[in-house]
Image (cartoon, helix red, strand yellow):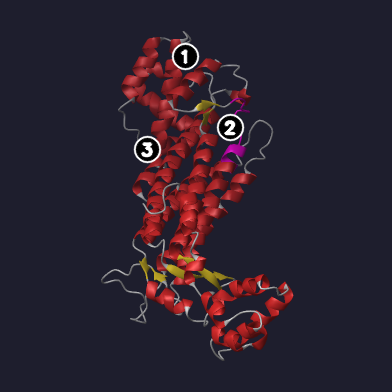
């Protein structure tokens, strides 16, 4: 997590100050729950809340204590005792460190997911606006990087919208997966803590109780969470890669906004590079790379070990902060994307009508030709066009074998862009769930 790729709201979730504040709330809510069921004096809970609610926990002091005791939770509890006084003896009764660490981690992951959901909402809004703007902007579709058949730029963006709508559902599900609390004590048996305390704390924090914990919350939950972030990052990369291809000089159907005063190269003043999309590709690799360690964290020894701890201290902040930044950056790219319909038309015309080859083949089949014969007739004329020898429609009209099946007028009628875009409204209705004419 470095400032260059961090946004303040997400980074704040992972600050030491926020972590210690959540630790305090877990301990204080647990103490209140114990007081409610008569296990500790109510005055103790009241004092802890009164002295700790607005306290500024001294990170440097806690770090200094930890250097001596070699235990982060004990260091925090020692500092809390300095603030609270004698009533602190009731704090953390029957609990173990994992109760605090795991519940806090899940609170942080839930908060991070809420920001990511808002990020995706902003991206979806930008994609929808630009999709309707270019619903009827015809462009060439490509398979294997080669011209295939026409589509529209709006359909390209509708595809991305549908993908990120799925991403939103996945993050919502991942949020639900980790929204659990565990305050079950050593090895998770509740031997020294009443299960009702866990229930009250979970409710206070907006979480569910973990049905069964082994002193720690099961890490398959977290594996699913980080795997989901990796899938969403892959969707970011897919769209960023599309933009990078479309911005190539030989294509130039769309490009990132190039602001006044921006410089593209230290050596070549003419350069306008897709630097944001390239950056998004790199960021996606990082987020995806954090999914595997999360999966490896699932297999811990017996009721607990801490082999997962160092991993989560890094991937928790880094994965969420990086994806948050990437989604916001992608939204900006889409929002300001410069689109060149005239270049799209130029590229449509580049291969002399070859994009209509399938329609010609199907028409020949309808006229009685076998599929094999129709394919061969179309391909031999298409390859001449591919080699730059002339116009596809002209070759077809001059081909005696083709002309025995179709007239010049019938062939000409097959070279109609509208044929390829006639179901765009249907696609938009399926994606956006509204009448295709409105945004």
Q: Quadrant of residue 28?
A: top left
In this view, the residue in front, 289 or 187, is 289
Residue 23 is situated, as x and y percent measured from the top left of the image, at 43, 30
- Residues at marks 2 and 1 touching, judged by CB atoms closer than 8 Å: no
Query: How far from the left and from the top, in percent, is residue 39?
Result: 48, 10
Q: Which residues are magenta?
A: 211-223
Under circle 3, the secondary element is helix
At 35% from the left and 74% from the top, the residue drawn is 264
Q: Residue at x 60, y 89 (%)?
A: 398
Residue 304 in percent (x, y) is at 63, 33
* Earlier-in-chain disc, 2 versus 3: 3
Q: Which residue is mark 1?
A: 34
In the image, what residue occupies the spot 61% across and 50% down? Answer: 292
User: What crowding class fits label 3: few (fewer than 14 Cα within 10 Å), some (14-19), or many (20 or more)?
Assistant: some
Q: Nearer the viewer, residue 84 or 143?
A: 143
Which residue does the numbered mark 3 point to in the structure image?
17
Most prominent secondary structure in the magenta stretch?
loop
Is residue 212 a member of the stretch shown in magenta?
Answer: yes
Is residue 301 a member of the stretch shown in magenta?
no
Quick check: can you spot residue 329?
A: no
| Res 338 → quadrant | bottom left
- Residue 344 point in image, percent of width and height: 43, 74
Which numbered circle lies on residue 217?
2
């Amino acid at each position: 997590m470095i400032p260059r790729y961090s946004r303040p709201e997400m980074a704040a979730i992972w600050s030491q100050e926020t972590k210690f504040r959540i630790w305090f709330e877990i301990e204080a809510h647990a103490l209140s729950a114990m007081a409610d069921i008569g296990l500790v004096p109510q005055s103790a809970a009241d004092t802890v809340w009164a002295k700790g609610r607005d306290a500024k926990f001294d990170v440097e002091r806690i770090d200094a204590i930890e250097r001596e005791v070699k235990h982060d939770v004990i260091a925090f509890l020692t500092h809390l005792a300095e603030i609270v006084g004698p009533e602190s003896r009731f704090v953390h009764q029957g609990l173990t460190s994992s109760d605090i660490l795991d519940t806090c981690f899940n609170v942080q992951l839930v908060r991070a997911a809420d920001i990511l959901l808002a990020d995706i909402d902003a991206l979806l809004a930008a994609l929808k606006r630009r999709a309707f703007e270019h619903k009827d902007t015809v462009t060439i579709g490509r398979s294997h990087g080669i011209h295939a058949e026409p589509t529209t730029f709006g359909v390209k963006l509708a595809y991305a919208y549908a993908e990120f709508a799925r991403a939103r559902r996945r993050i919502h599900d991942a949020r639900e997966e980790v929204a659990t609390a565990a305050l079950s004590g050593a090895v998770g048996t509740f031997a020294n803590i009443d299960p009702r305390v866990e229930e009250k704390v979970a409710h206070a924090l907006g979480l569910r109780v973990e049905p069964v914990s082994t002193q720690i919350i099961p890490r398959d939950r977290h594996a699913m969470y980080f795997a989901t972030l990796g899938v969403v990052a892959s969707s970011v990369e897919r769209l960023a890669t599309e933009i990078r291809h479309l911005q190539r000089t030989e294509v130039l159907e769309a490009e990132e906004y190039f602001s006044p005063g921006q410089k593209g190269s230290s050596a070549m003043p003419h350069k306008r590079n897709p630097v944001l999309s390239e950056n998004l590709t790199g960021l996606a690799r990082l987020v995806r790379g954090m999914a595997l360690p999360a999966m490896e964290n699932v297999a811990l020894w017996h009721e607990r070990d801490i082999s997962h701890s160092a991993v989560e201290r890094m991937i928790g902040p880094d994965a969420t902060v990086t994806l948050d930044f990437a989604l916001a950056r992608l939204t900006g790219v889409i929002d300001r994307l410069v689109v060149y319909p005239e270049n799209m038309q130029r590229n449509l015309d580049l291969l002399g009508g070859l994009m209509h080859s399938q329609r010609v083949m199907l028409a020949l089949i309808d006229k009685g030709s076998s599929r094999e014969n129709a394919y061969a007739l179309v391909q031999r004329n298409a390859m001449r066009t591919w080699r730059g020898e002339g116009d596809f429609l002209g070759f077809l009209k001059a081909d005696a074998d083709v002309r025995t099946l179709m007239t010049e007028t019938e062939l000409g009628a097959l070279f109609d862009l509208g044929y390829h875009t006639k179901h765009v409204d249907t696609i938009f209705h399926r994606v956006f769930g509204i009448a295709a004419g409105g945004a």
